[in-house]
Image: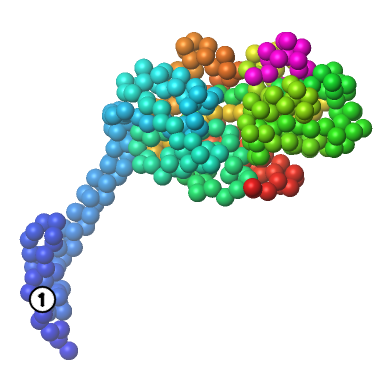
Amino acid sequence: MPIRRTIRSFWIPARGRMTPGFASVVATGRPDAAMGRFAVAMSRAAARSLAIAAIAVTVSPVVYAQDYPSRPVRLVVATSPGGGTDTLARVLAAALAARLGQQFVVDNRPGGSGIVGTDLVARAAPDGHTLLMGFISSLAMTPALMPTPYDPLKDLAPVSLVADAQYLLVVHPSVPARSLKEFVAYAKANPGRINAATAGYGTPVHLAAELFKQAAGIDMVSVPYKGGGPAAAAVLAGESQVIFGSVAATLPHIKAGKLICLGTTGLKRSSAAPQFPTIAEQGYPGFEMSSWYALMAPAGTPAPVIAKLNAAVQAALKDQDVREPMARQGLEPTGGSPADAAAHLKRELATWRRVIQEAGIKAQ
């Protein structure tokens, strides 16, 4: 049965002209030479389109990276102004601006243990003009403890590790221990009678204590305070007996004889306090805990842009104008490739999920 003639012509919108070969088939049901010419023309056009698309995919990010950044870059800090993360971000922002020729503007977005600011960046346009000064809490500990609106492994792209800060395990002088070995023996002889001050539930100070409790096989009571300052004050007053404190906050009290340092939490000794042995070298090989910081971008940010940012970070971390203020905070520069940062994040998430599960910690 012949096909009823219903269509007289076919328009290709991109060209704006009729293609008679295709119209002939639709109208009569019979292909002809024109249809053959149409097929050849279309296959050639398709080949050209694919070639152009391939060039666009491979070249456009490189061209984009050459012009990047094309406007000021927003560096989101998921904490309030004045804290350690904020201070580090401002130091790095100035160094990156000097190297990349655009302003890097720090934008503080505190809230929800870093969730608010981190989620803002995870949802931002992946063009390299919105970045995050990420830290251990919002990138690893909080996602390990509770559901977050972002997946740090899928929704963010690591640019580089920036710095880390060891903790010092310190006790009040009333504790009858002057070495880690003596402290563990005392804790085992007095289960549940030692209070470990923390800077709040699920914070690095809290989870550092839980990690050590599991490693040493001791029972301490974690006592949450409203921040690191009140927690340190409680130990100085003897209200609590132990804390994992930052180098910058605890070292002056150690020098004054108000606190006793029993060990540091890095795999190697702290450059700011090399006189103190690590916990790892005192019978707990592999023990490591530090508060680390990483520069992050939204997932999908072009690889050449990530590479350009990474190179700028590595250069900045060699600059004394960056290293000196970091040292005053007890921070040590880390750096490395985006792949290094991604692997570190993956390990940290696994570690803190395990610690939280073994400790039976629930979101509050």
- Left or right of 231? Residue 98 is left
Residue 198 position in % (x across, y down):
69, 32
Which quadrant would residue 240 be assigned to in this image? Answer: top right
Residue at position x 78%, y 24% in the image:
238
Which quadrant would residue 40 be assigned to in this image? Answer: bottom left
Q: Is residue 201 above or below residue 85?
A: below
The residue to which callout 1 is attached is: 7
The residue furthest bottom is: 1
Is residue 17 or residue 148 the one in the foreground? 148
Characterize the local packing of mark 1: few (<14), some (14-19) or many (20 or more) Cα atoms within 10 angstroms: few
Residue type, mark 1 in image: Ile
Q: In this view, does 293 lie above or below 363?
A: above
Is residue 360 or residue 68 the one in the foreground? 360
Point out the stretch of residues depicted in magenta.
249-267
Residue at position x 14%, y 69% in the image:
22
Residue at position x 49%, y 36% in the image:
110
Residue 71 position in % (x across, y down):
29, 29
- Left or right of 167? Residue 81 is left
Name the colouring of the figure: rainbow
The reply to whether residue 24 is visible in this rendering is: yes
* Placement of the N terminus among the 4 image quadrants: bottom left
Is residue 12 or residue 90 the one in the foreground? 90
Residue 159 position in % (x across, y down):
47, 31
- Residue 221 magenta: no
Circle 1 SS class: loop
Is residue 320 or residue 87 the one in the foreground? 87
- Left or right of 336? Residue 360 is right
Residue at position x 72%, y 26% in the image:
234
Q: In this view, does 110 lie above or below 328?
A: below
The reply to whether residue 118 is visible in this rendering is: no
